[in-house]
Image (spheres, rainbow, N blue to C red):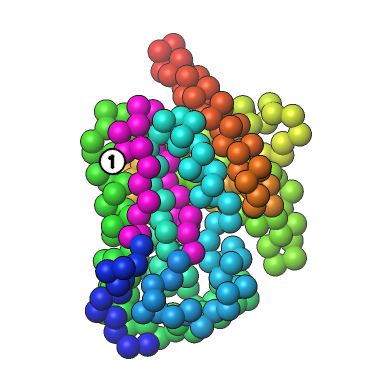
Amino acid sequence: MAPVSALLGADEPAPVELLRAEGASPFLLTADHAGRLIPRALGDLGVTAAERARHIGWDIGIAGVTRRLSAALDAAAVLQRYSRLVIDCNRKPGMGSAFVTLSEATRVPGNEGLDEPAKAARVAEIFAPYHDAIERLIEARARTVYVAMHSFTPIYLDRARPMHVAVLYNRKPRFAKLLAGLLRAEAGLVVGENAPYQLGDDTDYGVPAHAEARGLECVEIEIRQDLIAREDGQAEWAARLARLLPRALAALDEQAEA
């Protein structure tokens, strides 16, 4: 693919959807894979519309949950509008997985043989504005509890995933573990911890770069996509998390005072 010097046209959507920047809540919600837009200059990356609508293109349902949760908590939220197929905003740009050429079993021809100027354009116009917005919010706030919102497929490569929700953590596990306990107390929920994914420097960018680097309390939440593909499921999960996140934070603060 030829180098792209100006990736986004003036009439194309900005990469960042920012909600309630002045929200009173200490929670900061991020959604790295909220959208599935592709810049016009990149065409369809050689991927069919049906494939782009799958998990390889975005985290199905998580935008709806995040918007509703932001409203319920009066919490700031930052959502990425462009597809992870363009650049994965939860990966370091220098990693091969930031510009995936094979996602599950699907080739991404538009990412094959990318030169450095083409990669740099995607970093400058999509990755950087998103993460800069998160940085500015954190810097402006007295307290931030970082909540990274994601969703996962019920089946991956023919293997079923029985959990309904999972919490991921690495260097700062206390808040996540408190939230996991509250989720397990909900009737009928199967809750995973660091499954189906593990959170780490080689697999994630948002939590390590923004939260752990500052010593912020944090959690990455993964919700199974079939539970939030519809608006009623999104509303249900937003309401549940709006109840439980403040309870987990109150329990964390009580531990600190003890």
Residue 14 quadrant: bottom left
Q: Is residue 102 left or right of residue 157?
A: left
Residue 209 in the image: x percent, y percent? 34, 49
Image vertical order of residue 245 relative to residue 41, above or below? above
Q: Is residue 186 left or right of residue 143?
A: right
Q: Main secondary structure of the magenta part?
A: loop
Which residue is at a point 31% across and 53% down the rendered structure image?
A: 131
Residue 208 in the image: x percent, y percent? 38, 48
Q: Magenta stretch: give its range.
A: 14-36
Q: Is residue 193 visible?
A: no
**Structural crowding at the residue carrying mark 1, measured as other residues with C-alpha within 10 Å and reported as few (<14), some (14–19) or many (≥20):** some
Image vertical order of residue 123 relative to residue 219, above or below? below
| Mark 1, residue position | 137
Residue 92 in the image: x percent, y percent? 36, 62
Which residue is at a point 64% across and 52% down the rendered structure image?
A: 229
As drawn, the residue found furthest toward the front would be 11
Q: Secondary structure at mark 1?
A: helix
Q: Is residue 60 visible?
A: yes
Task: Assess whether residue 16 is covered by the magenta stretch.
Answer: yes
* Quarter in which the C terminus is drawn: top left
Which residue is at a point 60% across and 31% down the rendered structure image?
A: 240
Q: Is residue 100 left or right of residue 223?
A: left
Which residue type does callout 1 highlight? Leu
Is 206 or 173 nearer to us in this picture? 206
Residue 188 in the image: x percent, y percent? 76, 34
* Quarter in which the N terminus is drawn: bottom left
